[in-house]
Amino acid sequence: MAAEAGETAEQAPARGVGARLLRREDERYLRGRGRFIADMRLTGMLELAFVRSPLAHGRLVRIAKPEGSEERVFAPDDLEGVSGIRADSGLPGFRSSVQPILAGDKVRHVGEPVVACLAETRALAEDLAETVEVEFEELPAVHDMLRARDREASLLHEHWDENAFLETAVDSGFEAAIDGAAAVVTRTYRTARQCMAPLEGRGCLAVWDRQLEQLTLHSSTQMPHIVRTGLAGCLGLDHGQVRVVAPDVGGGFGYKGILLAEEVCAAWLAIRLDRPVRWIEDRREHLIAGANCREHHYEVTGYAAADGELLAVDCRAIVDSGAYSIYPFSACLEAAQVASILPGPYRLRGYRCRTWSVCTNKPPILPFRGVARTGVCFAMELTLDALARELGIAPEEIRRRNLPGPTEMPFTNITNKYFDSGDYPEALRRAVEALDLEGLRARQRRLAESGARRRLGVGLAMFCEQGAHGTSVYHGWGIPMVPGFEQATARLTPDGGLELRVGVQSHGQGMETTLAQVAFEELGVDPARVKLVHGDTALTPYSTGTWGSRCAVMAGGAVAAASAALAGRVRAIAGHLLQAAPEEVVLADGWARAGGGEISLEEVARTWYLKPQLLPPDVDPRGLEATEGYKTVKDTGTFSYACHAVAVEVDLDLGQVALTDYVIVEDAGTMINPLVVDGQVLGGAVQGIGTALFEEMPFDSAGQPLASTLADYHLPVAADLPAIRILHMETPSPLSRFGQKGIGESGAIGPPAAIANAVNDALAPLGAELAEIPLTPERVLRALAAAEARRGPGRGPAGARAAS
Amino acid sequence: MKSAPFDYLAADDLADAGALLREGGKPVAGNQSLGPMLNLRLVRPGRLVDLSGLPELRRVEEREDCVRLGAAITHAEIEDGEAADPTGGWLRAAAAGIAYRAVRNRGTLGGSLAHADPAADWVIVMTGLCATALLAGPEGARRVPLEDFVTGPFATALGEGEILTAVEVPRPGRGARWGYWKFARQVGEFAKASAAVLVDREAGRLRCAVGALGRQPLLLDDPAGLIEGRVDPGEALRRALPERAVEDLALHVTALRRALEAATA
């Protein structure tokens, strides 16, 4: 925002909330000067490699270690005093699993760690691992989530009665709502299993300190405090004996929001051997043992009135939850979330949903950026388009018809989600306008009539993203981690600088910049003089960490609260020194000013720390360090939302989908830093495009993963991407400190739905429709061939040339 | 993903390389295909003999009717025009489309041909251009036309101890046309289907080659008919590969059609 004439530079809002400050952390990231786990090297350090299960399902029969390897090779039985990882839910009917640190009597997915091998280098550790003999008795693998609950399916956890963690059901006036439906469409949707593929994989370095009797686990994690709690539990240590430190972390996305068996193992080994032990996940390990997200299956029936009013939705959803429930998120999280968020922002009269979190011989599912929303948005938005086609109305029209308007805010939807603020129809309108939908429709017709073997399509997706939701939302799950107050510490240093200490962890979110901007609002300290301390359990307040699009709201609110408390104490001292009342003191640009006098914050700090003789007699003895806790006004979460609008061109001979334009209209409430919001939205959108078009980990019937290198597992690359245009709306949230809303996951939610709708829009005149992602050329060609077979040979435009 | 141990030997010249290979060892140049296979422990050669620095393989000879490109010339050197291109840009364009720049910086022409991945660019391009492979071995030197050099998926005519030293690319005649088209879904990927069409009437060279078929490039037997539009590309492919399902050839038909369009439009 430009400063108005006459305004002094100090008053211009160039550094506080709303400023487009460049991210200060980028200085080291872009120059390759970050410090990641793989950059850390300690004297005497051993590298860890695992013998991993080659089978999806089997009984462990025998392990033969090479001779003389007692201090270097560790089998499951060697891990004395270590407990497996438990992450139970208190929801009725939940079946509980224990994930072993090294495989117990059974292995339950390919890539499960079985034996730990240590050597001076990773290469030597891998050589050693090859000399370990492990014998298994193979068991039938459960590889298909649709068959997992069959009576004849082999049981992963043999004390269970079926391969399912949890079944849920909701019914909200469904039967009564479907009477008089003019259109009823039923579709089966499927989303592929994915790997999150952060640039930096997982990794940890465990060190035992004999003097402190303390283990330090340096870990590439999003939630150091939760890892500490989980790790202390598994190792039987006091929290005081465990410190977890996250250095620079190269992307998380949920993949680093758990306690890993590998890090428990590394920690135990470091204590047992009294030597630093490091494990660095390589890409192959990631693709095989870390193929752990997004695999959903839906049967959805949508009911609509003739005017497009959505009457009801009926859904049966299955989520492939993999082999174990992992800490701290339980395996049922994703499927049960499907039930609560499928209706999204739309008005509905009736709703029914049953879900199953099924257990299969695959890596345990983790919540990936957007969690269940990406799948849910895909299922719901494709259903809307199918209804629109059935009714002969435009996709933008059916959405407009069913979205709550700004006067209906706050809006409580059919699953009791509380939409705090926003103008959803306006986001839709702007997206349609920015994409030039009218112009595209004309081009679409011209191209189809030209006889070209290409078709143009347009797709829309509307969705919301609940962020920073707290205790009231999560306690009902009965899971090991429920978020409460978020805390931050603000400390003025003797030189007038500011230290902020937060329990969340910044790994690409730009918090070293945005939280400094928040503090600037309260204290007027130049963001360049703010040091964010994060990622270290010894230095920061306890926090559930970075997940659920919560940091801008929760850590932002906590930093504001701590900074405000600190500002009060600074004003008291400065007022005394300036002979003014504290409430007259204005803090700006590193100075305290009152009544024409001014004193630097550095002088105020020096007075507290080093010249206490000058302090007022009634000074607050807690000094220039304040820790405050923060909760939103109502902890149901902020609802950011967006409309993704995309234009595609489909090559009918190749099945290739090219994105020719992409518009995102999003509302993150008040933006603390619009550049950071753009970065989050863009990065998320690219991951969503990966989900839509490329990423897929197939498994064969033996449960073997079939894409174990990046030559087979396809990630989106720059050349696949259009220039994504982002348009902002800024409807403040009434719930958060500055009106900001969580936006970190948003971008990854919309692309599969918008792109699939666009492809279906392009192919609808040919009778082809896709309902499974990624939209690979093979799937597109199969859909075209199936449509042609239905039409009969030689009839219709697709048959004309494909038969030649 | 760390390689099993191996010995690394860098050969000084062709004779040295021949001697080292006779003692056993796997030749390597740009290491762009072998490297990942080593790291995945899919191959475990006891030793590698590095040919990338051999002066005989780094040479480019411009002759009246052809250019001989040394086998250790990199894709990037061809792309950048540092190595002569007798075709007036066709080689440069093909090189620029290989994988991505990091691979092109190190990957070599000879390495790619000797590896003989059915989906690789040079395998189909050099076959389409009527190039000849020059081989040196214990029995002396010999010349093998590209269509006979690649004998199957990842299989070549290279004998025991033989080294691919250069590729001879003929200069096209006046008015010659060329079409090379491949379908790689993303930049950097191997092709799912590819085709090369050469129309060089002055030199009497007409060629329609189809690649990425999981075998050596397929040379269709009536190129003139295809080029003149008398033969349907789909029909030609189905006739040539009657054992393949029609739908498995669909992308290749499209590749051939688009290469023909590029060469004749």
Image (spheres, coloured by chain):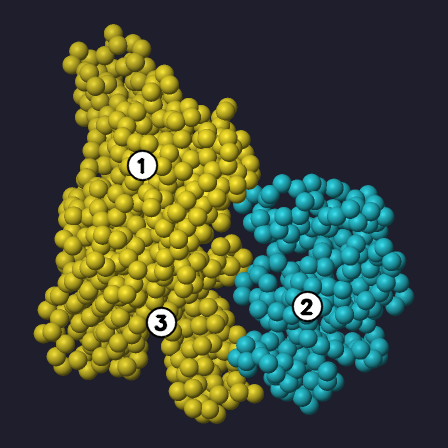
Chain colours: A yellow, B cyan
Q: Is residue A624 left or right of residue A172?
A: right
Q: CA distance from mark 1 to mark 2?
A: 53 Å
Around disc 3, counting alpha carbons within 10 Å, would you say few (fewer than 14), some (14 to 19), or many (20 or more)? many
Q: Residue at x 62, y 51 (%)?
A: B43
B131 vs A215: above or below: below
Q: CA distance from mark 3 to mark 1?
A: 38 Å
- On whether disc 3 and disc 2 are found on a single subunit, the reply is no
Q: Which residue is mark 1?
A: A227
Q: Is residue A599 left or right of residue A46?
A: left
Q: Give the mark nearest the N terminus, 3 or 1.
A: 1
Q: Residue at x 30, y 25 (%)?
A: A241
Q: Position of residue A681 (x, y in %)?
A: 38, 53
Q: Which residue is mark 3?
A: A771
Circles 1 and 2 in contact, beta carbons < 8 Å:
no
Tag in front: 1 or 2: 2
Q: Residue at x 41, y 73 (%)?
A: A759
Q: CA distance from mark 3 to mark 2?
A: 38 Å
Number of numbered discs: 3
Quarter of the image containing the N terminus of chain A? top left
Quarter of the image containing the C terminus of chain A? bottom right
Residue lying at the far right of the rendered structure: B64
Around disc 1, counting alpha carbons within 10 Å, would you say few (fewer than 14), some (14 to 19), or many (20 or more)? many
Q: Position of residue B158 (x, y in %)?
A: 77, 61
A156 vs A347: above or below: above
Q: Nearer the viewer, residue A415 or A30?
A: A415
Q: Nearer the viewer, residue A10 or A715?
A: A715
Q: Secondary structure at mark 1?
A: helix
Q: Which residue is mark 2?
A: B152
Q: Which amino acid type corresponds to the residue marked 3 in the rendered image? A: Ala
Q: Residue at x 20, y 48 (%)?
A: A89
Q: Secondary structure at mark 3?
A: loop
